[in-house]
Image (cartoon, helix red, strand yellow):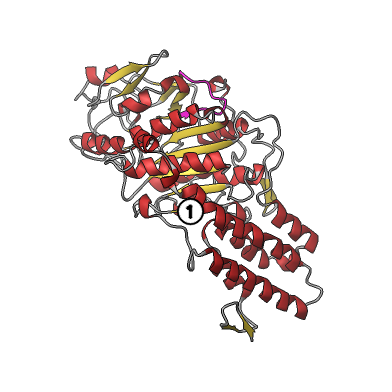
Amino acid sequence: MLSNPDGQRVPSNSNRRQLLKAAACGFGHVALLGLAEQESVAENTSPQELSAQYKSALEVRRSHFPAKAKRVIFLFIHGGVSHVDSFDPKPKLAEMNGKPVPFAKPDFEFAVTGNLLKSPWTFRNYGESGIPVSDLFPEIGSCVDDIAVIRSMENGNQVSHGPAALALHTGDGVFHRPSMGAWIVYGLGSENQDLPGFVTLSPSNYHGGSQNYGSAFLPASYQATRIGDGHSRFKQATFDNLASKNPDLQRKQLDLLKRLNKQHQESRSDDSRLAARILSYELTFRMQMEAPLITDLARESKSTFELYGIDKEPTDEFGRQCLSARRMSEAGVRFVHVNHSYPRNYWDAHGRLRANHSSNAKKIDKPIAALLRDLKQRGLLDETLVVWGTEFGRTPAAQGRDGRDHHPHAFSLWMAGGGIKGGITHGATDEFGYYVAENKVSMHDLHATILHQLGLNHEELTYRYAGRDFRLTDVEGEVVKDILA
């Protein structure tokens, strides 16, 4: 028997892998999870290789070519935001409101659409560029000179939320693939060795769930550290944590792990892999100590709270997420995944379009604009790529009396900062917004472009698995060069 620092007795044959996972507190979760995972494959890995894996999981790696952006903030707006009611005005819908669609409508899974439905919102021209944005997003509209709006997104035939969200996040709506954030950290590592490279804020457990921020067949150390979920208020969000956040207790837990490993090593003197495992314990502890400094919003000024709409409804929830994203990016987190997600927030307006989209837009418009302005005034926008995206758009024709159905054939997405040309639109849909008419952009094209801004060649960022070299863009993808500064 072995005693821990508090005098408690611990069986000498304790399952060390379980203890690793149990001690995975806060931001240290990913580091220790990676170690626990490696124990299952250690028998086939040399000590030298294992040590290199531990040391390099978060290590900064050289990009393929000079990068325009150092990091990404991805704003996932879950449920399907209507493009024809936000960033893609269609006067023809108003002209033909209530009339039948004058061509064959898309026929897919559960499409139940009627006649054409005009937007209940007015579009106004914003900024020097004069880009039209609807009254859903007046605050974002005021930032259009820093934004490139892509009006020609297409998500294949992914008509259901789950496959569509997976395609947006992983490039594949069917098979289990690593998420975009995992690929990026695999390719570049983390800017801050005391923090994880990939964090997700309030993700949904639905429609892809953890696969949207997971690592699949990449090492577990590249998956996201999760803070909160779609069911709970972000203000009360906590890290997955076994026990007390007391630093002294966490220090004792890690010391106990070292002692267990040392005892294990004494019985297996040739197992030099343990030395590599021990190297990560201090990293784990440093992550735990750094986390409160980054997530403590009380360190921010009153004016910053007002900018993001914090402590006011309906912007408090998403304002906290956006401010947290800025703090994490500023501290060196490579990829921050921000979610306005199901079930607490949901844009799936099969009915009551006006009420649904108006309510949701009021929650996110001010915080997102605040994020862009805050990054810009701090000199961070030029090196931070901000991506606003949804899994698909909504039909220009009505579903029922006042809703819109899913529509993967054409929708809008925008990008800002990180070497993106602001004040432009790219691509176009037809006069009704049903199909892409110019410069179609696929999920693979989007991913290739994001990787390119980070200095990564999407064709060269590969991982060998099951006998083939996988990549985020599979065998497709073209960089959307027209939106690059």
For this orientation, the residue located farthest to the bottom is 1
Q: Nearer the viewer, residue 203 or 306?
A: 306
Majority secondary structure of the magenta segment?
A: loop
Residue at 31% across, 32% down: 395
Residue at 49% across, 27% down: 376
Where is the C terminus found, in terms of image quarters?
A: top right
Q: Nearer the viewer, residue 240 or 361?
A: 240
In the depicted structure, whether residue 170 falls above or below residue 34: above
Residue at 49% across, 31% down: 375
Residue 244 drawn in magenta: no
Amino acid type of the residue tagged 1 in the rendering: Arg
Residue 274 x %, y %: 73, 68
Image-based side of 168 in relation to 161, left or right: right
Q: Which residues are magenta?
A: 414-423
Image-based side of 3 in relation to 213, left or right: right
Where is the N terminus found, in terms of image quarters?
A: bottom right
In the depicted structure, whether residue 365 falls above or below residue 465: above
Residue 469 x %, y %: 68, 46
Residue at 37% across, 46% down: 341
Residue 313 found in image quarter: top left
Residue 127 x %, y %: 39, 16
Image-based side of 29 in relation to 229, left or right: right
* Residue annotated with mark 1: 226
